[in-house]
Image: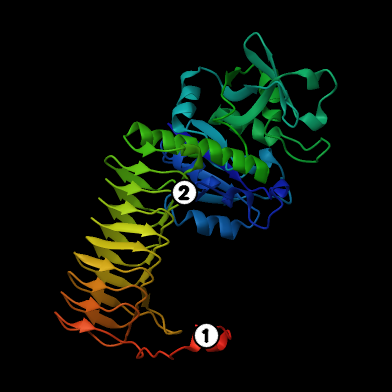
Amino acid sequence: MLSVIIMAAGKGTRMKSNLPKVLHKISGKEMLFYSINEAKKLSNNINVVVYHQKEKVIETMEKYFDDVEFITQDHENFPGTGGAVKCCNPKNEKVFILNGDMPLVTSEELQKFNKIDADIVMSVIKLDNPNGYGRVVIKNDKVTKIIEQKDANEEELKIKFVNAGVYLIKKEILDEFLPKLNNNNSQKEYYLTDIIDLANKAGKTIKAIEVKEEDFKGVNSKFDLANAEIIHQNRIKEKWMRKGVIMHLPQTIFIEDDVEFIGECEIESGCVFKGKSVIKESYIKANTIIEDAEIENSEIGPMARIRPASKIIDSKIGNFVEIKKSTLNDVKAGHLSYLGDAQIESGTNIGAGTITCNYDGINKYKTKIGKNVFIGSDSQLVAPIVIEDDVMIAAGSTITKDVKKGDLAISRTPQKSVKGFFYKFFKKDK
């Protein structure tokens, strides 16, 4: 059985942000979410060590998980990675130690650690330029020492193997050597890496597992964050393309982690999919944004915006159409319209420039439009309002009252012409 400790206590000063580092997002979710989510595939005993802005970190993660233990590091007395682990009491015989700023680690890669027989299994990456990382000394397939870069001498700095920061350690090793850690170093911190030296001296077996940088990439800056998101996005898009989604210029498309595609969908370049959107058997044209919405057997865009709580079925939504919290079933809205807080039934055509006026400055109101309604261009529908089946709305109308089945509704000021005004105004002959 495995336990997991996830270190999420640091300030992350290199992020240059008031937001805790582990709460910065990639693909719509906080980095720490991904670490916990993968850990839960391996263990039912997840311990997350917090300190900096701990209330915010805990509150955010409890929106996703209700069975994770959060432990506050005694940072004043025991700073550093060793101090973080000191405060934990894992339940199982082996303990994974992960980092909350490694959002690309997968449970499949972590499972490989458990296949190696050793007291300590640690991850290493071989880098051409290892600057910024702790170096790992490996002799005869065994790890003999880890040196933090700031404490390394000139010869040790030439080592290419670096510490990737993930460990699988027997609990008995932690119990024996954590109390022996000290802070006799330049940073006056308790280093978890010092356990390697202590365990070696005690004759324990420490082995390294070489891992891919892409999977064990740590995020220490916003540049790192952007690069991690590129990798994560590529994984998401590869998954959906392999399941049958057609993507044109996929590198220009952004898809958040919870988005779902069903059936053969087609996506043009520049589209953004956010929240828990579900796209089924639909064609999404270029530069369209869909957020927390359901799209089924429909054509959306180009340059449309579908906002949260919208459901669109068997419909065609064109360019520069914005839809918010509305249900459309077999509807055409070709261009330049806003449809908010609306329910629109089959066979209805929404003319260009149509707006549902759903907000009076205090409250939002509903617009209900029936079947086979034809709404002329540049119409305003002032909610709350009900437009029954088989209705025509004349172009340029402002509709403030319910319209009965079969009626034509028209609301315009009378047209007036002033004879010969053009020639008088510009002082021209006819």
* Amino acid at the residue labelled 1: Tyr
Q: Which mark is residue 423?
A: 1
Asked whether residue 91 appears in the rendered view, the answer is: no
- Dot 1 falls on a residue whose secondary structure is helix
Residue 212, horizontal then vertical, whole percent: 56, 24
Where does label 2 land, which residue?
68
Q: Quadrant of residue 363?
A: bottom left
Out of 175 and 15, give the one closest to the viewer.
Answer: 15
312 versus 137 height, above or below: below
* Amino acid at the residue labelled 2: Val
Residue 7, horizontal then vertical, whole percent: 60, 43
389 sits to left or right of 208 = left
Quadrant holding the N terminus: top left
281 versus 406 height, above or below: above
Out of 265 and 90, give the one closest to the viewer.
Answer: 265
- Dot 2 falls on a residue whose secondary structure is loop
Residue 424, horizontal then vertical, whole percent: 54, 89
Which numbered disc, 1 or 2, marks the residue closer to the eye? 1
